[in-house]
Amino acid sequence: MTQLLEKVIALSKRRGFIFPGSEIYGGLQNSWDYGPLGVELKNNIKQLWWERFVRRRDDIVGIDPAMIMNPKVWEASGHVKGFTDPLRECKKCHERWRADQIGDSCLNCGSKDLSVARNFNLLFRTFLGPIEDSSAEVFLRGELAQAMFVDFVNVIKTSRVRVPFGIAAQGQVFRNEITPGNFIFRTREFELMEFEYFIRENEWEKWFEYWRQEMHAWIGLLGIDSTHIHEHEISKEDRAHYSKRTIDFEYDYPFGRKELYGLAYRADFDLKNHMTKSGEDMSYTDPETGDKFVPHVIEPSFGLSRSVLITLLDNYREDGDRVYLKLPPRIAPYKAAVFPLLSNREELRKKARGLYTHLKSQFSVTWDDRGNIGKRYYSQDEIGTPYCITVDFETLEKDDVTIRFRDTAKQERMAVKDIDVFLKNNIA
Ligand code: ATP
């Protein structure tokens, strides 16, 4: 199984999905850069999420909040004091570990001589402006949720949302993790997609259940086998004190069953908390009944980086010598590749180039005229391109092409005039 991770890491690097960050300077502790194909895959997932949870719905609006917020936000939320992981240091090799992830010996050298656990704060600190003193100290955001609470009043004043409604955001967050690792599973900067769904208290169970199912449906859109997903009900002792229910969605990674996404009922804790600490009224008034109350909230939280990881892992296929990524077409970096059968025949190139330019104005498509057709198929399979279109001598006479399907490796003839509609119908 860990072989699968190694294969995916190698493919990601070889084909330009994800490279080690700052590699020419020796890299930087588990930092990764998304390459030309990785950024397409990641953006497609991001857009699909926004489309599904924001644009197509009447009850969720989006925001794009600043990454650096007033430090009072993080004091109010408890992150400055409590956003910590327990750290233990090996006294022999000085490696540092998260106490809840190791037993009683160092995973590096095996020594049992470990320091006692102390709490390590995960917020990244920096300074605003030119003077580096404590009055200028700020934090890079460690999560998105606080912005949705802080902007709550501005959102209800400026949009026509009515409870139940949600505020969504996507973006980079920063956590100074003690032990990043397992490729992009745990890194110190990563992207999140989440929303706060504001409800009446007496409806929390209904909405919790609704979002639980929606989260499963979303995971299906990434082409993930549902048997690899497991719900982990967080016990009362392990839940935040204000939460009546939290579920972790876990995935069977090659390195074990671990968290993918989270779903939490946060009651009215956050709005009330910011209301007390900022002194601003954060209640909601029902426009019909005049009823004034502080809404409760359900929070579905989706790690984008972990979404990319499971998409690559779960869709990796080997069929004899053939390696292909069975990506759902709508998230594949390229929807189709266009080839001239022979690269040195001008009439084929010209026709193929015309078709390519035409398709490129509507779809994400790529061109390849290197090597032989077999190699080009192999190369597109590896990056998950669902359709390969070849212009050959018959095309010149009959105006049709060979279309080859990634998952079955089967080929068909298709009229050039039908390709647009075919792609439109088959990439959604
Ligand atoms: P853990 O206990 O594993 O550190 P957490 O429970 O603190 O994680 P949350 O605060 O619930 O994580 O984060 C929300 C989501 O963000 C997670 O479900 C996961 O998808 C993602 N995530 C959290 N930490 C990281 C990280 N270091 N790198 C990549 N994704 C992460």
Image (spheres, rainbow, N blue to C red):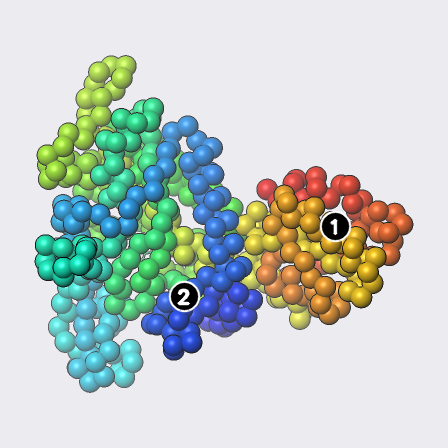
Q: Callout 1: few (<14), some (14-19), or many (20+) C-alpha neighbours within 10 Å? A: few
Q: Which amino acid does label 2 sit on?
A: Trp
Coordinates of residue 297 in the picture (x, y in percent)? 27, 36
Q: What residue sits 48% from the left and 56% below the top?
A: 39
Label 2 neighbour load within 10 Å: few <14, some 14-19, many 20+: some
* Residue under pointer 1: 354
Any mark on residue 32, and which?
A: 2
**Does the image show residue 80?**
yes
**Residue found 65% across the figure and 48% down from its top:** 360
Judge whether residue 245 can be spotted in this image: no
Q: Going 73% across and 70% down the picture, which residue do you hit?
A: 371
Quadrant in which ligand 1 is drawn? bottom left
Tell which tag, 2 or 1, sits nearer the viewer.
1
**Amino acid on which disc 1 is placed:** Gly
Percent from the top left, x then y, of residue 288? 28, 14
Q: Which residue lies furthest to the front in this view?
A: 130
Measure the alpha-carbon separation of dots 2 and 1.
Answer: 37 Å
Report how many numbered discs are placed on residues in the image: 2
* Rendered position, 150 above or below 222: above
Quadrant of the drawing holding the C terminus = top right
Q: Does residue 124 appear left or right of residue 76 in this picture?
A: right
Q: Pinpoint residue 319: horizontal percent, then vertical percent.
A: 65, 66
Compared to 376, does 67 lie above or below? Answer: above
Look at the picture and state if 230 lies above or below 283.
below
Relative side of 46 to 338, left or right: left
Q: Which of 172 and 228 is in front in this view?
A: 172
What residue sits 48% from the left and 72% below the top?
6
Say if disc 1 is inside 8 Å of ligand 1.
Answer: no
